[in-house]
Image (tube, helix red, strand yellow):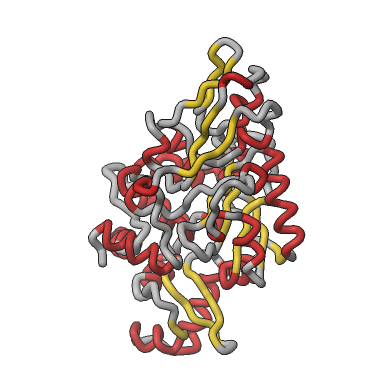
Amino acid sequence: MSENVYGRLARHLDNLPGGYPATESGVELRILRRLFTEEEAALAVNLTFISEPAEVIAERVDGEAEQVAAQLEAMSKKGLIFRRYKGGVPHYSASQYVVGIWEYHVNDLDLELIRDMNEYLPHLFQPELWREVPQLRTIPVDESITVEHEIMAYEQAETLVRERERIAVAPCICRREHQMIGEGCDKPMETCLVFGTGADYYVENGLGRYIDTDEALEILQLAEESGLVLQPSNSKRAVNICCCCGCCCQVLKTFKRHPKPASLVSSPFVIASDPDICVGCGDCVSRCQMDAISLVGDVAVPDLDRCIGCGLCVTTCTSGSLHLVRKPAEEQPKVPTSLARTYIMLARARGVL
């Protein structure tokens, strides 16, 4: 019974845009058994990516409405499904494993789940699929952009923040899991920005707290000072902004292991340098999260195959030898208008739509 219901849940999650592929070891089933009871798994497979009120789901599973509503609410509070309110009425929908269920467990991680997740990640993250339809994109820190740049509103972190009314901040699950196993770094923990209905979900579930625009902008400033890469959702209207380090972020770590990270990332900019005025201080080398800059003699030399256009090297370049340039038109990423559109594209790319 249990293997059957967890197998069905795994296939259900794999049919969502983000995917949940099977493995020979069955680690994906171990993860589900850690997170879901059999009853929760049996109910979860009946949810779709479209949010619905409890009574509609109860009718689908031929259950008693009040009992199903209570179970759905409990599952949403456990971070197993997503909940949003429409007209004051809770609506429930399936949640992807990543980005989704995994991140919703930031406050109740344990070493066994972290171990299983790290075993599963190489199967879950598929670089070629990410290149085609990424779930996150990279934008430059605002301080690296000058008035000479032609920059779109959705390429500016401050604009992405200012256009949202409800903002929450939550701990970074990547830095937290690394901290729990004695690895990682001491960069700021409370840096993940979530907007709109996602912010409501995080606050209602005790995963984060509401903040105002000024505090959100202060967090972005702290991210720049700490050398964190800004990765919003891959949509012009962002639903979140992750502030990521190359030592803990599972996305950046995967990029970093690739011989050409620039070929995977969705980013409109790339670094350029003027070696004649470089003073060879080396600050850019330590700031770069992709090992894209090296010192040759006393000159910083960028590796454009590794540059993801985050701009962190630019903001501490006292000589002005490093600056961002926009990629050619044919290399500009096509950013979907909404996250829903991103998920449709991702589902098509995976052949599940």
User: Residue 127, relative to residue 31: is it above or below?
Assistant: above
> Residue at 23% of width from left, 60% of height from top?
351
Location of residue 93 in the rendering, given as x and y in whole percent from the top left corner: 44, 74
Q: Residue shown at 58%/39% (left/top)?
A: 311
Left or right of 267 on screen, residue 180: right
Write down the quadrant of residue 197 in the picture. bottom right
Position of residue 97 measured from the top left corner of the image (x, y, whole percent): 43, 58
Asked whether 173 or 73 is in front, the reply is: 173
| Residue 225 can be seen in this image | yes
Which residue is located at x 56 percent, y 81 percent? 85
The quadrant of the rendering that contains the N terminus is bottom left
Please give the count of numbered marks on the rendered protein: 0
Task: Give 81 or 235, whichever is nearer the viewer.
Answer: 235
**Residue 331 percent location from the top left of the image:** 37, 45
Residue 245 lies, with reference to residue 108, above or below; the image says above
Q: Residue at x 44, y 43 (%)?
A: 327
Q: Can you say which quadrant of the picture contains the C terminus?
A: bottom left
Q: Work out whether 180 lies above or below 322.
A: below
* Position in image of residue 86 (x %, y %): 54, 85
Q: Residue furthest left?
A: 351
Task: Give the left or right position of residue 214, taking residue 119 as reference.
Answer: right
Q: Is residue 211 left or right of residue 43?
A: right
Q: Give left or right: position of 15 versus 106.
A: left
Q: In this orientation, which residue lies closer to the viewer: 292 or 272? A: 272
Q: Quadrant of residue 73?
A: bottom right
Q: Is residue 205 visible?
A: no
Farthest residue, direction top: 297
In this view, which residue lies farthest toward the front? 148
